[in-house]
Amino acid sequence: MKYENLYDMHTHSIHSFDGNHSVSALCKSAVEMGGKGIAVTDHCDIDGVEDYRALCKNQLNDLQLAIDDYGKSIDIIKGLEIGQGIYRDKEAKDMYNNFDYDFVLGSLHNLEKMEDFYFLDYKQYDIYELLGRYFSDLLKIVKQGCFDSLAHLTYPLRYIVAREHIDVDMSRFSDMTDEIFEALIKNKKALEINTSGLFMEIKDTLPNISYVKRFKELGGEYITVGSDSHFAERLFQGIEVGMDIAAKCGFKNITVYKKHEPILIPIE
């Protein structure tokens, strides 16, 4: 491996609706791959989950068992991905503040009372109006603050640009993304480099290097890197590319979290 300090800060187990392997299987695989650390960050798309307390309790129980089994061999970080937190504010705040998580990703997979961007028929929408609403709600998530790192900033482009081949002038949203970055910086939150897109039609990270560079220019301090893997065998995919991007943009460290406190890990 190119880097010694290899952390995958975005992974999913069977506690996610689209996961495929147990927490234990993920951690065992991460050890076998020689990683330094892994955050298991299962989905809790709060606008579609009725019993989030049971989900969190069961996942945290499995995480503790994995720590007991593999914690001496790899750094296992108790994580969660809260999706659409602004649509159920009270529940999002409860998860972030009152459960035993080290690290929470904040994300937006769909707009309120709509399907995931994956499922939308884009012929039925004004793309710029849709993206405007997306970035506006993403800013609300940042201001709400129930997360440690903002996941896959440019998530809808996986489908709008890469899959549907719709050209989008993203410069139209530069002011909005700058405002998101400024809010992240003000609130001492991280930006995620999500490497899943490298293995999808978009063939790039989410967000790409131009956004990471802009985040740094505005004063961004914290970067996390995650594969967004839903399979044990795909852990750490693209993480070294993500670390390359962070380094090229001027970051000396990646960030991991314990009890929501950032820990800087040298890119080496």
Image (cartoon, helix red, strand yellow):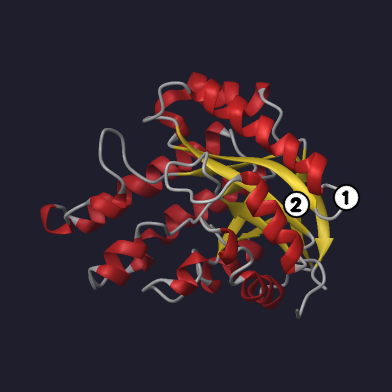
Residue neighbourhood size for the residue with mark 1, other residues' Cα within 10 Å, grouped as few (<14), some (14–19), many (≥20): few
- What's the residue type where badge 1 is placed? Lys
**Residue at mark 1 to residue at mark 2: CA–CA distance:** 17 Å
Residue lying at 43% horizontally and 76% vertically, measured from the top left: 203
Residue lying at 58% horizontally and 65% vertically, measured from the top left: 233
- What's the residue type where badge 2 is placed? Val
- On the image, the x and y values in percent for residue 98 come to 67, 21
* Label 1 or label 2, whichever comes before in sequence order: 1
Residue located farthest toward the left when viewing the structure as drawn? 124
Q: Quadrant of residue 235?
A: bottom right
- Answer whether residue 260 is visible to the viewer in this image: no
Q: Quadrant of residue 29?
A: bottom right
- Quadrant containing the N terminus in the rendered view: bottom right
- On the image, the x and y values in percent for residue 229 come to 54, 59
222 left or right, relative to 265: left
Residue located farthest toward the right when viewing the structure as drawn? 72
Residue neighbourhood size for the residue with mark 2, other residues' Cα within 10 Å, grouped as few (<14), some (14–19), many (≥20): many
Residue lying at 72% horizontally and 74% vertically, measured from the top left: 247
Above or below 25: residue 174: below
Q: Secondary structure at mark 1?
A: loop
- Residue ID for mark 2: 256
161 left or right, relative to 249: left
Camera-side residue: 44 or 142?
Answer: 44
- Residue ID for mark 1: 72
Q: Secondary structure at mark 2?
A: strand
- On the image, the x and y values in percent for residue 9 come to 65, 54
Residue lying at 79% horizontally and 68% vertically, measured from the top left: 252
200 left or right, relative to 235: left
114 left or right, relative to 236: left
- On the image, the x and y values in percent for residue 35 come to 76, 64
